[in-house]
Every structure is written in structure tokens, then in C-alpha cells.
Image: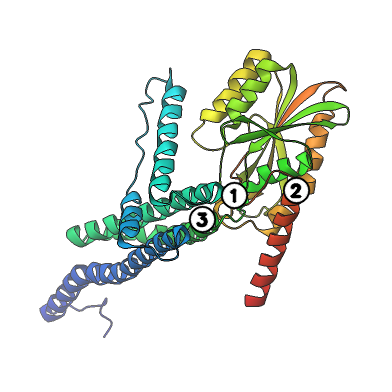
């Protein structure tokens, strides 16, 4: 008998009502149990990955960490930054700059305390590794938070929402773990494309520190005076490119400012594709970007931006070969921007991004290319 075709007898209707009651009562709970099993496994996986990142950073500090160092790193993974009030935009940049500088100083103090004798460049790499590990640790805590809420409330709706986000969460977590390890070891990452292009342009020219953790080289390009700016490598640094540009604009008459950075791509676009536009190509909280925009407006300086596209996760992972191969194309775009100025003009070229594993001259650039090729061959052998 078809359960959904009944006669007039009461027994059939009673059976039907019991069946529907049981279905609507137990089915959501069965689905919730199934979803909970899946997300519980994901939560445990993320916690394992966060712990792996923590242990990896600890071993990069010292091969034989004692309990004090382990506890110190574990404690620092709970570090957080509270953003300033932004309802009133007046003065927000100065507030952000102050908070960011406090954060940087705290990271430096922590590394100096647990590894006072470590090489300076290695310290910068460890700082970046810790920053990536903290992000992964926070992601694991957030997922665990919602798992426990679902357990307490038996909410099928919350479980369903979390389940739909799981593929993206796992993708982000895997990227953060790989990125943490690469940064802690001082390997180039996708976000280093800007500094890599800048180092290629610098070649063997003499460099000097123009701002905190930021270097500059003055070179000639097609009859123009070019000031090439990047974070000082090969340790993992972001530098102060905005402050450096502000300083140069106040000292020289600048005809054009060109920024080069990594940018997120859309699905369907190729990793390593290059695009150009106007404005300041620079991510982050916006402090350094604001400095460049302010002086550009004051002096009426054109702003060119050149970006190398990649997946957001590729920006924090070891540099893909397609990204490193984009350097000549990015330089070609830079040259096109330079042609829009006159001979004798002064221009600023800024390589924006994390300079982990990327030095400041031609030889260092060649080492990056060799490293990317070796890693690419290793991946091919393992797949």
C-alpha cells in the first residue's frame, strides 16, 4: 500500500499521523547528528593544524625548546589587537598607526625575550611565522566556539550554516598552515611579488635605509630618475613604504608614483596574470596607503597601480612559479607607466608586500627564482 494514498479507515490515518510525527521529530535530529559528526572532525583537524603551526614555530626558534619557551609561545598565540574607534574618521589613521606600531613592538619584545641571540633576519621571519600561526589558531577557536554552541542548543540551522562554510574554512586553514611554515623558514610567498619586482629593478644599485625596515635605491630608467622602494629583506618585513614615499615627495619633485602589489584573482582568471590601473595598490589596514594618497593629492601626482593576480590563499603560501614568472610582465607594465613621464622627471616605484626570502639586489632575485624552480620540481615528483 502506498503510504500517501489512504482509504477512509481510521487505522491508516492513525499510522500515517504516527509516521509523519516520527519523521518530523527524528529526521532533523538525525541530520544534526550527521552534520555534527562532520564539523566536529573539522574542528579537531583545525585544532591539530593550529598546534602543528605552534610546534613548528617553536622548533624554528630552537631545535630543543624547553618548557618555558613552549609555554611562552603558547601564551603569545593568544595575543590580539583591538582596533581603534572609527566612527569619527578624523585622526583614525594616526590611531591605527599607533596600534600597529604597538603590535610590532610587542612582537619584537617577545622574540628578544625568548631568543635574544638569534640572527636579526631570522627574528623577522619568526615574527611573521607567529603572526600566521595566531591567525590559524584564532580560526580553530572560532570553529570550536560554534561547534560547542550547536551542541548546547541542538540548532540544526546553525549547524547547516557552519557546514556550508566548511570547504572555505578548510581551504583557508591549509593555506595559513603552509604560509606559517614558509614565513617562519624565511621562504618567499606570493605576497612578495611586489618586493621581487622592486629588487629586480634595483639590480646591483646601492641601497640605503630611508625609513624603518624600508630601503630605497636611486636608479636611471630611460632617462628618468627612479626611486625604487621596498621593505628590507630577506627577513619577513612589510616596511613603511607610505612614510618612505612621503619623505621622498617632500624632498624631490615627483612626476609619478607607481605601486606594485599582489591582488586577489577571480575564479577563471590565471594565477600570475598582470593588470594595471590607477590608485595605490596596497592592502592592509590602510595606514601606509593613506600617506601615499595624501601626498599625491597635495602635489597632484598621478598614481599608477600594477597588480599580479593570485588566489588569496596563494598570497600567504610559498610563491607559485606562475607568480615568479610574472616579474618580466610586471616590469613591462612599469616601463609603460614610465613612458607617460618626460625625460629628466623623477618617479617613485614601490614594491609592496612581504619581503620574506627576498633580498635587495639582483643576486638575491636569482636565488628566489632558483628556489621557486626547485620547489616546483619537488611538487612534480610528489604528485
- In the picture of the structure, the residue carrying the numbered disc 2 is 327
> How dense is the environment of label 3, judged by Cα within 10 Å: few (below 14), some, or many (20 and up)?
many
Q: Which mark is residue 184?
A: 3
Image quadrant containing the N terminus:
bottom left
Residue 301 position, x and y percent, is 70, 19
- In the picture of the structure, the residue carrying the numbered disc 1 is 356
Q: Quadrant of residue 349?
A: top right
Q: Nearer the viewer, residue 37 or 239?
A: 239
Residue 117 position, x and y percent, is 47, 50
Q: Earlier in the sequence, mark 1 or mark 2?
A: 2
Residue 354 position, x and y percent, is 58, 45
Element on which disc 3 rests: helix
55 relative to 359 in the view: left or right:
left
Q: Residue at x 24, y 71 (%)?
A: 27
Q: Quadrant of residue 252?
A: top right
> How dense is the environment of label 1, judged by Cα within 10 Å: few (below 14), some, or many (20 and up)?
many
Q: Residue at x 60, y 23 (%)?
A: 293
Q: Earlier in the sequence, mark 3 or mark 1?
A: 3
> How dense is the environment of label 2, judged by Cα within 10 Å: few (below 14), some, or many (20 and up)?
many
Distance from Cα at disc 1 to Cα at disc 2: 17 Å
**Circles 3 and 2 in contact, beta carbons < 8 Å:** no
Amino acid at each position: 500500500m502506498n503510504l500517501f494514498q489512504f482509504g477512509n479507515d481510521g487505522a491508516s490515518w492513525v499510522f500515517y499521523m504516527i509516521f509523519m510525527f516520527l519523521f518530523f521529530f527524528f529526521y532533523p535530529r538525525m541530520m544534526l547528528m550527521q552534520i555534527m559528526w562532520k564539523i566536529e572532525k573539522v574542528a579537531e583537524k583545525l585544532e591539530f593544524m593550529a598546534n602543528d603551526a605552534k610546534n613548528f614555530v617553536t622548533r624554528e626558534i630552537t631545535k630543543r625548546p624547553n618548557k618555558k619557551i613552549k609555554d611562552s609561545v603558547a601564551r603569545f598565540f593568544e595575543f590580539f589587537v583591538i582596533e581603534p574607534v572609527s566612527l569619527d574618521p578624523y585622526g583614525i589613521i594616526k590611531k591605527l598607526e599607533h596600534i600597529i606600531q604597538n603590535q610590532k613592538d610587542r612582537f619584537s619584545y617577545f622574540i628578544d625575550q625568548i631568543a635574544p641571540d638569534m640572527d636579526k633576519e631570522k627574528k623577522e621571519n619568526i615574527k611573521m611565522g607567529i603572526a600566521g600561526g595566531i591567525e590559524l589558531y584564532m580560526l580553530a577557536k572560532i570553529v570550536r566556539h560554534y561547534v560547542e554552541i550547536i551542541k548546547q542548543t541542538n540548532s540544526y540551522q546553525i549547524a547547516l550554516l557552519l557546514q556550508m562554510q566548511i570547504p572555505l574554512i578548510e581551504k583557508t586553514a591549509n593555506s595559513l598552515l603552509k604560509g606559517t611554515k614558509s614565513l617562519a623558514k624565511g621562504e618567499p610567498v606570493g605576497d612578495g611579488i611586489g618586493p621581487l619586482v622592486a629588487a629586480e629593478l634595483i639590480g646591483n644599485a646601492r641601497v640605503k635605509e630611508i625609513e624603518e625596515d624600508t630601503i630605497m635605491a636611486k636608479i636611471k630608467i630611460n632617462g628618468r630618475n627612479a626611486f625604487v622602494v621596498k621593505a628590507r629583506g630577506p627577513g619577513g618585513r612589510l616596511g613603511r613604504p607610505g612614510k618612505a614615499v612621503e619623505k621622498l615627495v617632500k624632498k624631490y619633485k615627483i612626476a609619478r608614483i607607481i605601486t606594485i602589489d599582489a591582488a586577489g584573482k577571480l575564479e577563471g582568471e590565471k594565477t600570475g596574470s598582470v593588470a594595471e590601473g590607477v590608485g595605490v595598490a596596497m592592502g592592509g589596514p590602510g595606514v601606509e596607503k593613506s600617506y601615499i594618497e595624501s601626498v599625491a593629492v597635495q602635489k597632484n601626482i598621478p598614481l599608477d597601480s600594477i597588480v599580479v593576480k593570485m588566489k588569496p590563499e596563494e598570497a600567504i603560501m610559498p610563491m607559485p612559479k606562475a607568480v615568479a614568472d610574472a616579474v618580466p610582465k610586471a616590469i613591462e607594465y612599469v616601463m609603460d607607466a614610465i613612458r607617460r613621464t618626460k625625460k629628466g622627471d623623477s618617479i617613485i616605484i614601490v614594491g609592496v608586500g612581504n619581503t620574506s626570502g627576498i633580498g635587495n639586489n639582483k643576486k638575491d632575485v636569482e636565488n628566489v627564482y632558483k628556489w621557486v624552480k626547485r620547489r616546483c620540481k619537488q611538487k612534480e615528483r610528489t604528485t
